[in-house]
Amino acid sequence: MALTPALLARGPWDPSDVQAFWREDPFEPGPEETKAADELLESLRQRGSPSHDGLAARLVDYQAGEQGLSLQLQPARWALRLLPEGAGGSISSLCIVRAADGRWLAGRRAGWVASWAGRWALGAGGAVEVDEHPADTLGRELQEEWSVTAERMTIEALIRSPTGMVLLVGQAWLAEGAEVTPDAEHDEYAWWPADLAQWPEEADTPLRVVGAMLAAGSAPSA
């Protein structure tokens, strides 16, 4: 049975209504987590994936309401996100990309990448860098992965993935006629129909869950 994401908080919010507070003390994982992360990082090196480590963000706590979303973040070792369970509370930003007519941008991840290798994913996503606002991560990843800028963006939800990683989900609407150019992390891409019922077979359960959540609360109007 396919595992599905868990909804922690639901917007939508304007990016300006999302606050991020950083703790100065880095997260200290236990010895078993450290060992497992070391082994997974080495396996990436052996298959030619980027193997730099360093620090990224983990979610310590959050508060959500109609007025906005507040995130308490802490520096944590990037490699903890490779753990199959728990992920050290690591947080990433996921930018779902919509065309002006409502179609969804999907890309197949190249076989060498660290996460979701060979699988289809929606939009753009990546780790939140230390001292970076997670809402800013959305626009950065969109530009880095697809060389395009959103006409408008909303922060839609905070989700915990089946691995334990937390995702700040944003939705970016592109201008009429906007074109995307995939980066090297994608070996194929497609615009999936606005109607989720017409999505292709490669759209797996987690993608359909996220798509259904966003489709229920958004429309391509300004």
Image: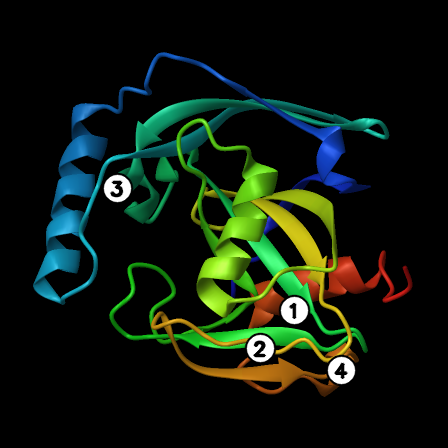
Which SS class for mark 2?
Answer: loop
Distance from Cα at disc 3 to Cα at disc 4: 36 Å
Q: Is residue 1 visible?
A: no
Name which of mark 1 and mark 2 comes first in the sequence.
2
Tag shown at residue 29 = none
Q: Residue at x 54, y 59 (%)?
A: 142
Dots 1, 3 in contact, CB < 8 A: no
- Which class describes the residues within 10 Å of circle 1: few (<14), some (14-19), or many (20+)? some
Dots 1, 2 in contact, CB < 8 A: yes
Q: Residue at x 69, y 44 (%)?
A: 157
The kind of residue tagged 3 is Ala
Q: Residue at x 81, y 78 (%)?
A: 101
Q: Is residue 137 visible?
A: yes
Name which of mark 2 and mark 4 comes first in the sequence.
4
Find disc 1 in the rendering and name its residue: 208
Dots 3, 2 in contact, CB < 8 A: no
- Which class describes the residues within 10 Å of circle 2: few (<14), some (14-19), or many (20+)? some
Find disc 3 in the rendering and name its residue: 79
The kind of residue tagged 1 is Arg
Which SS class for mark 4?
Answer: helix
Distance from Cα at disc 4 to Cα at disc 1: 9 Å
Which SS class for mark 1?
Answer: helix
x then y, percent, for residue 206:
57, 63
Find disc 4 in the rendering and name its residue: 197
Q: Residue at x 68, y 75 (%)?
A: 178
Dots 4, 1 in contact, CB < 8 A: no
Q: Nearer the viewer, residue 114 or 131?
A: 131
Left/right placement of residue 106 relative to residue 216 reads: left
Name which of mark 3 and mark 2 comes first in the sequence.
3
The kind of residue tagged 4 is Ala
Find disc 2 in the rendering and name its residue: 203
